[in-house]
Amino acid sequence: MRTLQYQTAGLAILLLLLLSPGASASQSRRDKNIWNYDGGVFFATDGSLPNGVCFRVSGNLDAPDFFLNLKRINDEKGTIFRRGTETVTHFPDELFLSLDIHDLPCTPGLRETESRTYLTPEMIRTLEVSFYWKRGVDLRPAKNITELHSAVEPIVPYASNLTSQLPKRFEWSYQLAVPSKDVPLTDSLVLVFRTTDGRIAARVAARL
């Protein structure tokens, strides 16, 4: 009985707290969501080619010191971006986009019953990438993007003693400069990968 009485008293106190004026303020604090962008904006997606090859695109959108301590705050009033006490509304004049591409199984985690076809330099050359700034549902081309660096590196298999018997695999990496003057932080940079016949092979957005 004593335990039951304590439990009942505890429930009564909890109800009083929930019904007290301070409860709404506490709830408001819980409703506030904060994202930290130290290191920039990261993104990833999976794509596929008509020949059955699947691949992953991952990357990062950054700028020197711009994303350091930058936070997005969502609350009942809307969304704002802050760096300390400063309100930030737009991207810097230029962003740097890092991009990696490598193949992967189309059904990860499942045992493959037949041999895989791997992503090759020839297949990569058939891909065309378009860049857009997205605002709501509207897309507008992101112009004057320049390639700063590109590289192709072999992927070393776990079973290094079988290297000569296994198909060669590669990872492609790119660094691009993206003009972003006067672009609001609420816009997203969208990357669309298409095959030569116009089919969308992959699509991903770098979104704050």
Image: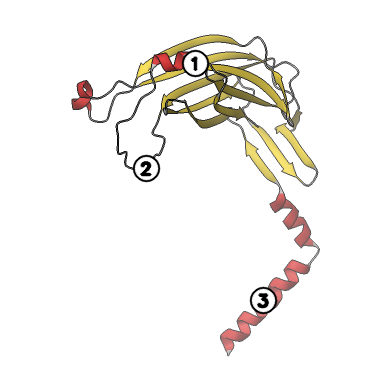
* Residue placed under numbered mark 3 in the picture: 11
Q: Residue furthest left?
A: 161
What percent of the width, then of the height, locates residue 49? Answer: 47, 25
Q: What residue appears at the point 69 percent right and 53 percent down from the top-left corner? A: 30
In terms of image quadrants, where is residue 141? top right
* Residue placed under numbered mark 2 in the picture: 109
Identity, as a three-letter code, of the amino acid under mark 1: Tyr
Quadrant into which the N terminus falls: bottom right
Q: Tell me which numbered mark, 3 or 2, is placed earlier along the sequence.
A: 3
Q: What residue appears at the point 61 percent right and 18 percent down from the top-left corner? A: 130
Q: Tell me which numbered mark, 1 or 2, is placed earlier along the sequence.
A: 2
Q: Residues within 10 Å of mark 1 (few under 14, many from 20)?
A: some
In the displayed structure, does residue 91 sit left or right of residue 76?
Answer: left
Label 1 SS: strand
What percent of the width, then of the height, locates residue 195? Answer: 52, 19
* Residue placed under numbered mark 1 in the picture: 174
> Mark 1 to mark 2: distance in Å?
28 Å
- Residue 39 visible in rendering: no
Identity, as a three-letter code, of the amino acid under mark 3: Leu
**Tag in front: 1 or 3:** 1
Q: Are marks 1 and 2 in contact (CB under 8 Å)?
A: no
Q: Which mark is residue 50?
A: none
Identity, as a three-letter code, of the amino acid under mark 2: Gly
